[in-house]
Amino acid sequence: MSSREEFKGAARPPGAPDSDEFWHLSDAVRKNDDGGLDAEELFAEFGYIDSAALPYIAIQRAMRLAQFIDQGKTDVFQGMPALWLDGFAAALTAGRYEPTTEEAKV
């Protein structure tokens, strides 16, 4: 059942959108909550992403956020949404990427 169907008629938090995009993202996040991402499924969809590069970049971005928190430049309540949006923007950009190496073209 989709998030939209499950929460139809239920009270949503003030300001929560009701767009198709919101419900699509909600379904994706809830799927992750229900068992996490299946790495093989992810790489099948984005076959050109180096399986070592993705976790490396994720860890580096998390470490960068930790530095900002330690330096007092942000806190976790501002940093975590920013990190999530950073990943989303990176995924959109990666979706437009054209592989250049022979290994990635397979």
Image: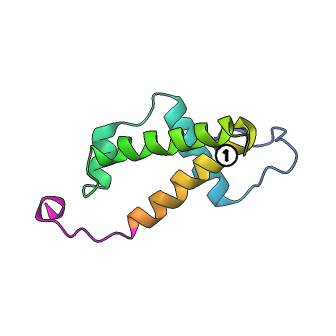
Report the number of numbered marks: 1
Q: Residues within 10 Å of mark 1 (few under 14, many from 20)?
A: few
Locate residue 80 relative to residue 98 in the image: left or right: right
Residue 28 x %, y %: 53, 45
Q: How is the image coloured?
A: rainbow
User: Which residue is outermost to the front?
Assistant: 71
User: Which residue is outermost to the top?
Assistant: 35
On whether residue 99 falls in the magenta region, the answer is yes
Q: Is residue 8 in view?
A: yes
Q: Residue at x 29, y 54 (%)?
A: 49
On whether residue 89 falls in the magenta region, the answer is no
The residue closer to the viewer here, 95 or 14, is: 95
Q: Secondary structure at mark 1?
A: helix
The residue closer to the viewer here, 57 or 68, is: 68
| Span colored in magenta | 96-106
- The residue under label 1 is which amino acid type? Pro
The residue closer to the viewer here, 44 or 4, is: 44
User: Which residue is outermost to the right?
Assistant: 14
Q: Residue at x 88, y 46 (%)?
A: 14
Locate residue 87 relative to residue 15 in the image: left or right: left
Which secondary structure is most common in the magenta stretch? loop
Locate residue 84 relative to residue 43 in the image: left or right: right
Q: Give the quadrant of the C terminus.
A: bottom left
Residue 52 x %, y %: 27, 43
Q: Residue at x 27, y 45 (%)?
A: 51
Residue 7 x %, y %: 72, 39
Residue 58 x %, y %: 44, 43
Q: Which residue is mark 1?
A: 81
